[in-house]
Image (cartoon, helix red, strand yellow):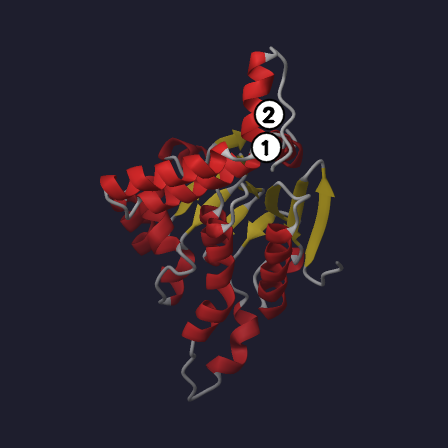
Amino acid sequence: MAYETLLTATTDGVLTITLNRPDTLNAFNGAMTDELTAALKTAERDADVRAIVITGAGRAFSSGQDLADLKDQYAPGEKPLLGPRLRNGYNPIIKRICGMEKPVIAAVNGVAAGAGASLALACDLRVASSKASFVEAFVHVGLIPDSGSTWLLPRLVGHAKAMEMCILGDKVRADQALDLGLVNFVVADGDDLAAEAQTLAARLAAMPTRAIGLTKRLLNRSITSTLDEQLEAEAYDQETAGKTDDHIEGVTAFLEKRKPAFKGR
């Protein structure tokens, strides 16, 4: 499918989605929000897609909301109505990434600010260029962090650091993000971030992706579950995993002393 604001390519079961508005540092306008929602929805349903990489074109991952796209709401005497844009635009993207039972990797090639930072936080793993940075920029325009940042960020870096990042709005460099647990890997300047992200995604795509998806669901659920609820959820999902072709293949390969060939089924 051709998009106006995205580039997509699929290799070895990995779908790479590139935010493609480099002249605006890949800021979100209405078209990009709609297209990213559609691309993720299609990927979730496509059995041939077993892992997803989200990255940005040019020198940024995403600078967040394109304020020029909202200029009509800031005409003299007007008060912007921002809730519908979140409920109908950003929130479905964040919920789909967090809810889909496929691994999603953010390849953060430059600044990830505002909703761009939230998008990266929603992904399951984050691989960052050493030139990347994260900014909870909302406070600089008198807004609160949105698109999931107030839920995702404290769970990654803790309440105190999340508070600092949100109310000061300072830039967090890639090396600092790694120390905080905000990113999983940092690729040194001069190395190929896209290749590193593709290698990681291809590794995940070749693994038992049904089990990965169930694990993702359990970990996300554990944040609000009691121990008893989580133990029962594990028992239920383990029964589901035990019925997959990949589980049978994994055990058979172990017994036959060979490398398993998982199919994501």
Numbered tag placed on residue 156 in the rendering: none
Label 2 and label 1: CA atoms lie apart by 6 Å
Q: Is residue 38 left or right of residue 11?
A: left
What residue is pinned by disc 1? 245
Residue in view at x 34 percent, y 63 percent? 144
Classify 166 as above or below 76: above
Percent from the top left, x then y, of residue 100? 51, 49
Residue in view at x 62 percent, y 61 percent? 38
Q: 10 Å neighbourhood of mark 1: few (<14), some, or many (≥20)?
A: some
Quadrant in the picture for residue 187 = top right
Which amino acid is tagged 1? Asp
Q: Is residue 185 left or right of residue 25?
A: left
Badges 2 and 1: C-beta atoms under 8 Å apart?
yes
Nearer the observer, 122 or 182: 122
Percent from the top left, x then y, of residue 48? 69, 43
In the image, farthest residue toward the top: 257
Does residue 108 appear in this view?
yes
Q: Is residue 89 left or right of residue 14?
A: left
What residue is pinned by disc 2? 249
Q: 10 Å neighbourhood of mark 2: few (<14), some, or many (≥20)?
A: some
